[in-house]
């Protein structure tokens, strides 16, 4: 970590996808790596398929600011419906994106954006990456519920921080430690996942496989270098 | 009276029932090793209370302090808090806290927003009764339309209650202020209630790094024998003044007593300064004191301003910053000194009223230097970019002499 890096990440998805859990794993991973991070979850009534946002700041220097991220330099869209159905607190999904920023979208194919959206994204010189996160989750872990892990893996490759060992430790702390229970609903989903995998060790292994696969996907597609110019 | 050591108070160096060592406050705060943790603000409240030798706590749920008051209940279940109960309403909670403090207990509670206002009658009563209760206000919106999100307007209501009011910027301040607050509030020459304030959600629900004192060390217990007024005694003030008010005897005695008693409360706030300066390393913190453009505020607005200072620095513009730690006592002299060379003073605030700007204008000369803003309210965040934009816009208008002072 020679260069000063600062990423203000806005994550948007829908209830049940583990957006807040993803933000926790990314955030804690940065802390484990020796950097700084703060995280602010944001959701209304807690129900499946309702809009969820989470804001993560990660840096290898001091972070002071707090609250929702209005001007992100990284945006993560966990579900295509955030864009196609407007399931989001922030419309359009790239609102406030800084110049040269990154947008990582979970979708197997590019989404048809309207002309104004295409133009505005071009004006900001946005780097848009489509990651088949749910497909990777199904292939590697046999469940859609690991979509969030794929998103975490790809974005850490794109940003260059946190590294994979730190993420692995963070995943361990999340599922083995006392953890960070964001809500009753999350606790219930944890139980579902745990039953599915029978053993937590298996759960960790599968999650890490998804993270690594998505990380490699990002590297193989040449996304990792492009973000190095992203500014706050 | 503080010198009487043999009245049954647990001594420094001895252990409490949980095996925690009762530790001299200065040693605990400044010499003991600190360990780093990554916690939500609510968890930080729990960790501080665990080290605070709290005798009694009363809880009542309201967003965004419900998690904190529930976590204090866990401490009680584990034996770290003497007694714990849930009140019927915030009004009842603050009355029950008064009962505990009148009886000589160290009391802790939390509330927020509408809960603060519902309980309000009790706060000046606490101060007038010289009860050193600590309450954490996790401030949120109080005005319509309803907001459960961070807004600092409720602090404006608290300013003249006679309480000490400290405003935490982040999780670290919150941890330290909760523990240090008791030490200052319980000084015999202070002996007043203290409100430790943090911005709801921004601090309570955000995970942040905090350096914590050792888990097995606690601050000394409250010593009710050092109180400047008697504990629950029907025949002497303050209880005598309540059960048998002077106004029932003579209006003139009532006026006289009220004046002298309230002057003493205000004087006690001022006497808290020297203890607070020592423990908090001053009532304010200043960055770039020689800058012509200064930002000044308290709480989360300071964090946002720190980033605005950074954004300006990246553009080659020097901007200074004053963080106000204590709102009561208000650091009038310190603020005057810190702003003496400033040409343009901006006061970012998370409320619609701009009460902090009024406080600052009231203590400095050439108050036309103050721009009350930027403001956000009702729970909005204040991106550093907005602070930068507001300053640039105001300075441009000032250049054209078009500025209307906020």
Image (tube, grey):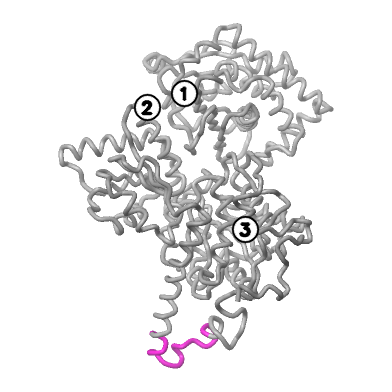
Residue lying at 62% horizontally and 59% vertically, measured from the top left: B60
Looking at the image, residue B71 sits to the left or right of residue B354; the answer is right
Between marks 1 and 3 in the image, the one whose residue lies nearer the viewer: 3
Q: Of the numbered discs in the image, which one, if any, rests on residue B314? A: 2
Q: Secondary structure at mark 3?
A: helix
Q: Are marks 1 and 2 on the same chain?
A: no
Instruction: Kindly identify which chain the residue marked by label 3 belongs to.
Output: B
Disc 2: CA contacts within 10 A as few (<14), some (14-19) or many (>=20): few
**Residue at numbered disc 3:** B25
- Magenta span main SS: helix
Q: Nearer the viewer, residue B328 or B136?
A: B328
Q: Earlier in the sequence, mark 3 or mark 2?
A: 3
Q: CA distance from mark 1 to mark 2?
A: 17 Å
Q: Secondary structure at mark 1?
A: loop
Q: Secondary structure at mark 2?
A: helix
Instruction: Kindly identify which chain the residue marked by label 1 belongs to.
Output: A
Between marks 1 and 2 in the image, the one whose residue lies nearer the viewer: 2
Looking at the image, residue A17 sits to the left or right of residue B325; the answer is right
Q: Are marks 3 and 2 on the same chain?
A: yes
Q: How many marks?
A: 3
Q: Of the numbered discs in the image, which one, if any, rests on residue A73? A: 1
Looking at the image, residue B162 sits to the left or right of residue B337; the answer is right
Q: Which residues are magenta?
A: B241-255
Disc 1: CA contacts within 10 A as few (<14), some (14-19) or many (>=20): many
Q: CA distance from mark 3 to mark 2?
A: 41 Å
């Amino acid at each position: 970590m020679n260069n000063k890096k600062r990423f203000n990440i806005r994550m948007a998805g829908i209830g049940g996808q583990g957006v807040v859990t993803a933000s926790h794993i990314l955030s804690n991973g940065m802390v484990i790596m020796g950097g700084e991070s703060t995280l602010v979850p944001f959701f209304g009534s807690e129900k499946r398929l309702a809009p969820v946002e989470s804001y993560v700041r990660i840096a290898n220097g001091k972070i002071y600011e707090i609250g929702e991220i209005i001007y992100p330099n990284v945006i993560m869209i966990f579900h295509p419906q955030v864009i196609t159905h407007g399931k989001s607190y922030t419309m359009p999904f790239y609102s406030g994106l800084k110049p040269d920023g990154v947008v990582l979208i979970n979708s197997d194919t590019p989404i048809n954006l309207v002309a104004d959206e295409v133009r505005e994204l071009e004006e900001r010189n946005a780097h848009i990456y489509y990651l088949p996160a749910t497909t990777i989750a199904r292939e590697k872990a046999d469940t859609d519920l690991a979509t969030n892990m794929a998103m975490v893996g790809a974005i850490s490759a794109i940003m260059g921080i946190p590294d994979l060992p730190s993420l692995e430790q963070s995943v361990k702390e999340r599922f083995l430690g006392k953890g960070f229970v964001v809500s009753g609903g999350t606790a219930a989903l944890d139980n579902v996942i745990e039953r599915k995998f029978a053993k937590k060790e298996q759960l960790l292994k599968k999650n890490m496989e998804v993270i690594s696969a998505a990380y490699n996907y990002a590297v193989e597609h040449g996304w990792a270098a492009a973000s190095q110019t992203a500014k706050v | 009276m503080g010198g009487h050591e043999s009245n049954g108070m647990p001594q420094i160096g001895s252990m409490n029932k949980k095996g925690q060592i009762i530790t001299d406050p200065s040693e605990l705060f400044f010499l003991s090793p600190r360990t780093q943790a990554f916690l939500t603000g609510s968890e930080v409240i729990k960790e501080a209370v665990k080290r605070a030798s709290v005798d009694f706590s009363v809880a009542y749920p309201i967003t965004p302090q419900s998690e904190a008051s529930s976590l204090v209940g866990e401490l009680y279940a584990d034996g770290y808090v003497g007694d714990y109960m849930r009140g019927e309403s915030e009004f009842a909670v603050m009355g029950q806290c008064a009962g505990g403090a009148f009886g000589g207990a160290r009391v802790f509670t939390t509330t927020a927003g509408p809960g603060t206002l519902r309980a309000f009658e009790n706060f000046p009563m606490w101060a007038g009764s010289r009860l050193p209760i600590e309450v954490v206000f996790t401030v949120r919106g109080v005005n319509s339309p309803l907001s459960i999100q961070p807004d600092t307007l409720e602090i404006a209501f608290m300013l003249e209650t006679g309480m000490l009011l400290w405003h935490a910027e982040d999780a670290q301040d919150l941890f330290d202020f909760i523990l240090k607050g008791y030490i200052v509030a319980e000084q015999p020459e202070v002996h007043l209630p203290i409100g430790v304030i943090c911005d709801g959600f921004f601090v309570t629900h955000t995970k942040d790094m905090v350096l914590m004192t050792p888990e097995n060390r606690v601050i000394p217990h409250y010593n009710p024998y050092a109180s400047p007024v008697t504990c629950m005694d029907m025949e002497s003030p303050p209880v005598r003044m309540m059960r048998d008010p002077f106004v029932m005897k003579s209006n003139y005695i009532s006026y006289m007593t009220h004046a002298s008693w309230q002057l003493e409360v205000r004087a006690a706030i001022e006497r808290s300064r020297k203890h607070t300066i020592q423990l908090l390393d001053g009532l304010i913190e200043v960055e770039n004191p020689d800058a012509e453009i200064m930002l000044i505020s308290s709480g989360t607005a300071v964090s946002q301003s720190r980033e605005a200072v950074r954004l300006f620095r990246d553009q080659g513009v020097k901007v200074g910053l004053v963080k106000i730690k204590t709102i009561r006592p208000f650091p009038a002299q310190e603020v005057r000194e810190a702003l003496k060379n400033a040409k343009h003073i901006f006061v970012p605030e998370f409320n619609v009223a701009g009460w902090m700007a009024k406080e600052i204008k009231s203590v400095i000369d050439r108050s036309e230097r103050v721009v009350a803003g930027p403001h956000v309210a009702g729970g909005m965040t204040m991106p550093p970019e907005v602070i930068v934009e507001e300053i640039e816009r105001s300075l441009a208008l000032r250049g054209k002499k078009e500025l209307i002072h906020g």
